Amino acid sequence: MEFILLDYTTLRVIWWLLLGVLLIGFAVMDGFDLGVGALLPFVAKTDEERRLVINTVGPVWEGNQVWLVLGGGAIFAAWPPLYAVSFSGFYLAMFVILFALILRPVGFKYRSKMPSARWRNNWDWALFVGGFVPALIMGVAVGNVLLGVPFHFDDTQRIWYTGTFFGLLTPFALLAGLLSVAMVVSHGAAMLVIKTDGPVADRSARFGSIAALLTFVLFALGGVWVAMGLPGYAFTSQVVTDGPSNPLLKTVEITAAGGWMRNYTDMPATILAPVIGLLGALLSAVLLRKRRGGLAFLASGASIAGIIFTVGFAVFPFLLPSSSQPSSSLALWDTSSSHLTLWIMLLATVIFLPLIIAYTTWVYRVMKGKTTTAEMGENPNAY
């Protein structure tokens, strides 16, 4: 009995789009948490101000990490070879990210346990590391997707990663990492302008507008670098979009510089993604200067979405190119789970993703309003 209503090719494209949506959800929702952590030592000067900053994200940061779990789960279930290559090849980088993320809950819980200024200052810098480092390394990882990663499969499809952690830290990848930091810092600053008043909001608006301008400059510079200096990847064998998932059934070559711009020529509508990324960053900088936090938050969120989709459209249909053996590159058409698995997962997503969005919306509706020092004094659960 035929019960599968969508063909294999369509399901693969849907899950490629869903992966992008989940990554954007993480970057937008947990991104402002990371940005607030990175800004903490700079926008808050006194102990009271730093507690104020921490309590703007304290009630919601754990819920926001659901998007990280969803993104990782989607990669694991929908794109198993991608999960295997990235989480094994980038093992040390993943460990550094995990260590930095662990500092956040520990910092939130332990920072105010002792009145010592030195104790609290150390935890404030730990929260800075917990915000800055994950944003930096995740951006470096995206930069390496555009550069290609040194891995290959043998005849039995065992994965061999031949790179090193420090080999990932190339100039272009570091530029992508700094772009990621600037992006989440401007986003976090917009949230602080929404949730606070007085000197903290003033400093947040100033730092955030600078970060938004840096986002614009770094994104534009990265775009020029990709268009003028980076080679791309292209199939040299017939493209089979509904065949079995076996990365060794194709041949791929590295193209000349500017090869990643091919999709923007073939599909002109995709140019909207980088345009939104650039305009959103500029608009966010202007709105932060005017202390329009809510609109700045929307503008920076649109910029984040535009930047992520810019990368996705550029490398499509590749998910993770191989620089050492191009034919081992992981592509949309040869890396997915089975037809039935993608279909069942899509049904689960249609049911549960709206519930997550509805619950998140309700939480933010309940938590709306400014965070104040008076409120912290009255709330025994405040950090």
Image: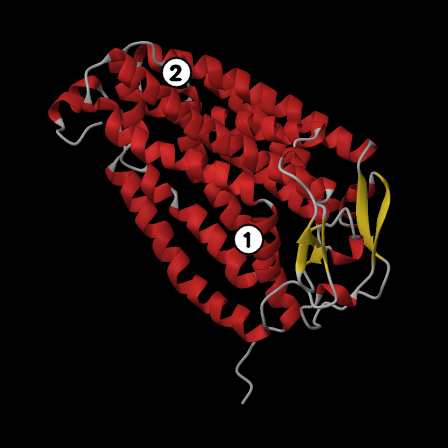
x 57%, y 60%: residue: 15
Q: Is residue 251 visible?
A: yes
Question: What numbered label is drawn on residue 19?
Answer: 1
Circle 1: residue type = Leu
x 41%, y 12%: residue: 203
Instruction: Name the quadrant of the N terminus.
Output: bottom right
Circle 2: residue type = Pro
In the depicted view, which residue is nearer to us: 248 or 62?
248
x 35%, y 32%: residue: 104
Q: Position of residue 191 (x, y in %)?
A: 39, 27
Q: Classify 109 as above or below 158.
A: above
In the depicted view, which residue is nearer to us: 351 or 42?
42
Q: Secondary structure at mark 1?
A: helix
Instruction: Name the quadrant of the C terminus.
Output: top left
Q: Secondary structure at mark 2?
A: helix
Q: Which residue is mark 2?
A: 41
Q: Classify 306 as above or below 283.
A: below
